[in-house]
Image: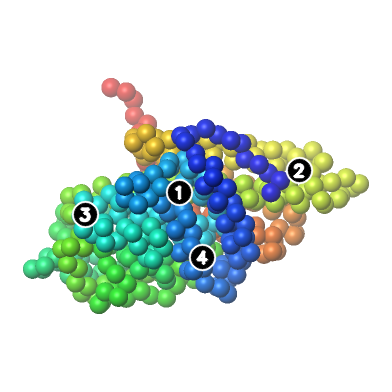
Amino acid sequence: MSYHPLALPAGAINHDRIAAAIEFAEARLRPMGEAWDRGHENPEATLREAIALFTPITIPEKLGGFGESFATQVRVYEELARRDMGFTCALAVHTNVTVAMSLTPNEALRNRCLPRLLSGAAVGAFLLTELTGGSDASAITTAAMATQDGYRVTGHKAWVTNGLYADIFAVFCQTEPGSGAKGVAALVMERDSEGLVIEPALDLIGSTAMGTTDARFEGVAVPAANIAFASGTAFKAAMFGIDVARLGVAAMCNGAAMGALGAAVEYGAARQTFGKSLLDHQGMQWILADTATAIEASRALALQAAQRFDQGEPHPVLTAHAKKYATRTAFEGISEAMRAFGANGLKRDSNLPRQLAAVRVSECMDGTGEIMNVVIGRALRPSA
């Protein structure tokens, strides 16, 4: 691509991993993005390949991962999403489940699930959101009733990314009605668990590759051996997972914007109007220059947030800034890139409509811009 992002320092970045991501994305994602988005092809086999290559990045080596930086993960997501954001979202959600499983205090469960999640033998899904809970993550109604050997789960989860493909479901349930966050526990279910019903894929405006569904639990028996995080600890684990997810969304939006700007630059250099290339008209130069500035500012913010993860001190407010700004930058940046294409930007073969829809979907993931403002606003307090 003719737009080359600036090299921004943030932690130790494994550039060989970035090169592998570019190679994989060019060979496997770019040719298939439209077919996946229209539902003509199934991305599951490619997803399992990508998992083995990129999910282990931040997992410690002693647990079977690569032991690399969150900054490397951010750059990988940028390059994958630069070619297809919907697919990259599916990979990112799986990776978030894998990160959570690497942190569970249930060593036997970790040893049983983590190798499968790292290799792609299993795809993971993160089930927190409910139809009526919306952005109030503590208002979980999916009930886990204690039994002699664990829990029996009934309820309904919404917006299950990877629902079509997942083998391992990390389900957040309420064990003590009325107790709020304190009673939330995280339980692991396998796809063939009796009473687990995966509903048909949701018909979304984009990101079909995410395989998003709802899920119902009709008295699913979950043994104590499958408790990933007990009540009293699970909600904190969920919030950390959401913070990781917001960083991933920021990275992916930045990548989608980078791809759109690159396509606009290539098109503008080739398109002749009034005796010169479109890119030589000052009006178009300035539009694309403003887009480039916004992208680089957004990338710097996301990489700064990644650095805090690498230092072992994640900063939820900084991550909220990154997620909010990246979704806004990407939507505006892709829209401006479509202006450079004129009417041709409306054609699916430009890839721009698909990426624009994917960014709009991502704005609703892991907290909307308004929720990011709540997080940021709460931090705007006078010093004591």
Residue 283 vertical placement versus 132 (above, below): above
Closer to the camera in the image, 86 or 278: 86
Which label lies toward us, 4 or 2? Answer: 4
Q: In the rendered structure, which disc, 1 or 2, sits on the residue that comes first in sequence?
A: 1
Q: In the rendered structure, which disc, 3 or 4, sits on the residue that comes first in sequence?
A: 4
- Residue at 65 percent across and 51 percent down: it is 260
Tell me which amino acid carries mark 2. Met
Q: Percent position (x, y) of residue 109?
A: 23, 59
- Residue at 47 percent across and 55 percent down: it is 53
Which label lies toward us, 1 or 4? Answer: 4
Q: Are marks 1 and 2 in contact (CB under 8 Å)?
A: no
Indicate which disc residue 107 carries. 3
Tell me which amino acid carries mark 4. Thr
Tell me which amino acid carries mark 1. Gly
Q: Is residue 174 left or right of residue 377?
A: left
C-alpha span from label 3 to label 2:
57 Å
Residue 243 vertical placement versus 32 (above, below): above
Q: Quadrant of residue 280?
A: top right
